[in-house]
Image (cartoon, helix red, strand yellow):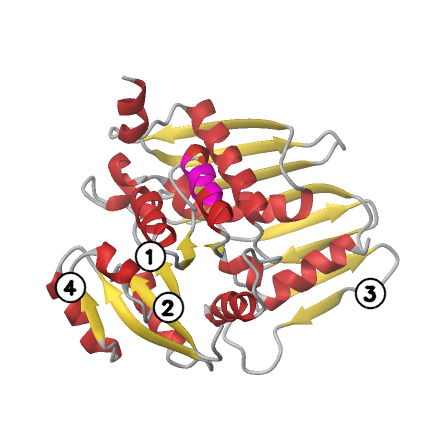
């Protein structure tokens, strides 16, 4: 892999714009192409960010020989198609979260990447955050003893109109895939895939989850109480409690600038993001992809594919408990 990693951006929405903007300030990265469903949208995006090539179809980006890795920033329902196109064309892929609509699609993508020996990573930027990495290290090293409970929530007040994508089942709308993926991924980072999944949800008239509570359980006796919502402005905090202490993360737990370690019999210790680092930066995620590519890795140790598959299985289990099915899944059963 060359020193400069050449990126193609697939989609032109808000998260794609943030990623492209941050890549411009990331050493060793160059955005060489963008693709959208329409050439006009791709051209406008290219002009905005100084990108030399703009394509009105995804396959053209996937086939571009100047692209080393494709960043897939489409809505969930298109992840399987878009990432699959790029992998089939021999490109490395960073695909937004949730990885796909369901575990079946995720398994297909992972199998394709592994069969072809290509890099694939879910864009779970939380896992690349320096403080989340430090927190996970402390838990692994036994700083709070054996993990007993995890609590995390992510909720937005809305309201979102019926025609908003978060209310549209055809694009994987609802709270779970957009927001719930964070609390679930946080819990599974620390405890792995749960042995039991319970859930309750308020559903919209369109059939997506608006407000969802989850109780995950492990054979060790550990449990996680998690929630996500698009109708309630929740604290967006998290905590992990062990037999010897607790770690608390403040508002915005998935991109923290600090957390507090409380160990039995000791003064609280505060861990703070160093220097002038931006807590909301996507650069650590991009840098991890480029590090892996330069080292010839096909998976990131920070965001392993087996972990992404395990999260998708949990999200599937939650949807099964609350009765959410996407039109694509219903069509397959018909």
Q: For mark 1, what is the residue?
A: 73
Q: If you read the primary sequence from the N terminus, does the residue marked by circle 1 or circle 3 appear first?
A: 1
As helix, strand or loop, the secondary structure at mark 1 comes to loop
C-alpha distance separating marks 1 and 3: 43 Å
Q: Is residue 97 visible?
A: yes
C-alpha distance separating marks 4 and 1: 14 Å
Using the image, determine if residue 268 lies above or below residue 160: below
Quarter of the image holding residue 196?
top right
Q: If you read the primary sequence from the N terminus, does the residue marked by circle 3 or circle 4 appear first?
A: 4
**Left or right relative to 202: residue 122:** right
Asked if the residue at tag 3 contacts the one at tag 1, i.e. Cβ–Cβ closer than 8 Å, the answer is no
Q: Residue at x 47, y 72 (%)?
A: 283
Q: Residue at x 38, y 49 (%)?
A: 156
As helix, strand or loop, the secondary structure at mark 2 comes to helix
Using the image, determine if residue 130 lies above or below residue 217: below
C-alpha distance separating marks 2 and 4: 17 Å
Q: Nearer the viewer, residue 242 or 2?
A: 2
Numbered badge on residue 19: 2
Q: Is residue 106 magenta?
A: yes
Q: For mark 3, what is the residue?
A: 267
Asked if the residue at tag 1 contacts the one at tag 4, i.e. Cβ–Cβ closer than 8 Å, the answer is no
Q: Nearer the viewer, residue 130 or 287?
A: 287
C-alpha distance separating marks 2 and 1: 9 Å
Q: Quadrant of the C terminus?
A: top left
Asked if the residue at tag 1 contacts the one at tag 2, i.e. Cβ–Cβ closer than 8 Å, the answer is yes
Q: For mark 4, what is the residue?
A: 41
- Crowding around mark 3 (Cα neighbors within 10 Å: few <14, some 14 to 19, many 20+) is few
Q: Nearer the viewer, residue 139 or 78?
A: 78
Magenta segment: 105-111
Spot occupied by residue 26 in the image (x, y as percentages of width and height): 45, 79
As helix, strand or loop, the secondary structure at mark 4 comes to helix
């Amino acid at each position: 892999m060359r020193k400069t990693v050449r990126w193609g951006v697939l989609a032109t929405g808000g998260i794609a714009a943030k990623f492209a903007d941050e890549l411009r300030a990331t050493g060793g990265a160059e955005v060489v192409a963008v693709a959208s469903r329409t050439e006009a949208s791709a051209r406008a995006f290219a002009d905005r960010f100084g990108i030399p090539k703009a394509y009105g179809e995804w396959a053209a980006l996937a086939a571009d020989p100047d692209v080393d890795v494709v960043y897939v920033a489409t809505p969930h329902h298109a992840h399987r198609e878009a990432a699959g196109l790029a992998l089939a064309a021999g490109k490395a892929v960073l695909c937004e979260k949730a990885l796909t609509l369901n575990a079946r699609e995720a398994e297909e993508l992972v199998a394709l990447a592994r069969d072809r020996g290509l890099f694939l990573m879910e864009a779970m930027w939380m896992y690349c955050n320096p403080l989340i990495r430090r927190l996970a290290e402390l838990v692994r090293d036994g700083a709070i003893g054996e993990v007993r409970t995890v609590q995390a929530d992510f909720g937005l007040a809305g309201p979102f109109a019926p025609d908003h994508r978060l209310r549209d089942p055809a694009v994987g709308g609802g709270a779970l895939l957009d927001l719930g993926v964070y609390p679930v991924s946080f819990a599974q980072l620390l405890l792995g895939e749960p042995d039991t999944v319970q859930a309750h949800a308020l559903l919209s008239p369109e059939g997506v989850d608006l407000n969802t509570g989850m109780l995950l359980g492990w054979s060790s006796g550990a449990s996680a109480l998690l929630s996500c919502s698009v109708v309630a402005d929740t604290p967006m905090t998290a905590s992990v409690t062990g037999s010897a202490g607790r770690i608390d993360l403040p508002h915005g737990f998935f991109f923290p600038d600090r957390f507090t370690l409380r160990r039995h019999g000791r003064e609280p210790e505060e861990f703070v993001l160093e220097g002038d680092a931006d807590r909301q930066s996507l650069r650590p995620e991009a840098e991890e992809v480029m590090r892996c590519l330069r080292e010839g890795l096909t998976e990131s140790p920070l965001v392993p594919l087996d972990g992404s598959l395990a999260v998708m299985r949990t999200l599937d289990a939650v949807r099964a408990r609350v009765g959410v099915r996407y039109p694509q899944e219903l069509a397959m059963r018909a």
